Image (cartoon, rainbow, N blue to C red):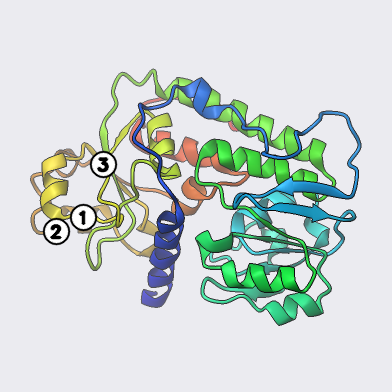
Amino acid sequence: MAATRKLFLLVLLAIIAGCTPAASTPAPSPTTAAVAATPTAVAPTATAAPAFPITLTDDEGVSVTIPAEPKKIVSLTPDTTETLFAIGAGPRVVAKVEDIANFPPDASSVPVVATFNKVDVEKIVDLEADLVVSGGTGLTQGDAVTQLRAAGIPVLVSYPTTIQGGLASIRRLGQAVGLGDEAATLADTISGDLDDLAVLASSAGERPRVFYEIDASGGIFTPPSSSIYGEMFRLAGAEPISGDANYSISLEKLVAADPEVILLGDAAYGVTKDQVAAREGWDGMTAVKSGRIAPVDDIVITRPGPRLAQGLRALIEAIHPHLVLPSPS
C-alpha cells in the first residue's frame, strides 16, 4: 500500500511539474471553459473521410506525419488508452502504459510496455507499432520519444494541461487513427456536459474555499490553481487553495487560507475524514469544524480523457452535495 501510494504521488507531481503555468487569470466562465479547442494543425471536419498521410502538430509543437491509418497503436498515457477505447480504436491497441486504475476494463488484457519510470522501447519496436502516443517530456518519456522516432515510428505527444487542451487532444487523436468523426462527437458530448454541469454549479449560492489533498504523509501536497485541477475546481463552483510552485503548502499557510471544504484525493490510499480531523493543528479550520471533508476519486477528476465530465460531476457532488445533478449522458 505504501509503495502504491508513493507511486500515486510521484505520478501526480510529475504531471504538475511538467506543466508550464500561465500567468494568473480570472476564473473562466462555464461557457468559455467548456468549449473544445481546435487542434493546432489539422482542423477536424464533421463529414470528411479520414485521409492519409496526415500531419498533425502535437503538444510539444512537433509536426508528426502518419503515413497510413495505424493498425498497431501503443498508448503511453492512461488517458490516451481511455480515449482510444472510447472512440472505437481499442482493438488496434497492441500495448499500453501501466494504469493503476485499470480502466477501461476492456484494456486489462493489453500488454504493458511502460511504467511511470520506464518505457520498453525495444519491445515497442518489436511489436512493429505504426503509431505511439506518448506523454513526452512532461511524463518523463522524452528519451523514449527520441529513440522511437529514430527507429522510424511516428510518435504523437499528447500532454494536455487544460480542459480545452484535453478536448483538443481527443479530437487530434481521432484524426491520427482515422476516427476523426467519432472523436469529434465524443469531445462535443464532453464539452456540452461540462458546460451544463458548470452552469448548475454556479447556481449553488456559494463558492467555498477548497483544499484538495494529494498527500499529507510527508508534507502537504496540493495542486496549483493554474493547473487543470484548479480549472476543474473553479468550474465546480469553488475557489481552490493553492500551494507554491513546488505544489506543496505549509500547514501555517493552509491554516491561514482556512479551507471551507477539504477534498481527499488520497482517499483511495486509506485517508479518512476522521484521520484528517484528528491531525494536530487542523482542528481550527472551518472545513474540519463543520465536517465538510469528503473523499473523491482523484483519477476520474484529474485524468484529461473521456471521463472529464464524470470528474466534474464528482467534484460538484462533493463540494455542493445539496445540488440535484442531472443523470449522466
> Quick one: SS at disc 2?
loop
Residue 316 against residue 108 in the figure, above or below = above
Q: Can residue 309 be seen in this view?
A: no
> Quick one: SS at disc 3?
loop
Circle 2 crowding by C-alpha within 10 Å: few under 14, some 14–19, many from 20: few
Q: Are marks 1 and 2 in contact (CB under 8 Å)?
A: yes
Q: Disc 1 residue type?
A: Val
> Quick one: SS at disc 1?
helix
Residue at image position (20%, 40%) is: 259
Residue at image position (37%, 53%) is: 265
The residue that disc 3 covers is 241
Q: Disc 2 residue type?
A: Arg
Calculate the distance from the C-alpha at mark 2 to the C-alpha at mark 3.
19 Å
Residue at image position (47%, 46%) is: 301
Circle 1 crowding by C-alpha within 10 Å: few under 14, some 14–19, many from 20: some
The residue that disc 1 covers is 276
Q: Which of marks 3 and 1 is nearer the N terminus?
A: 3
Q: Disc 3 residue type?
A: Ile
Residue 114 against residue 169 in the figure, above or below = below
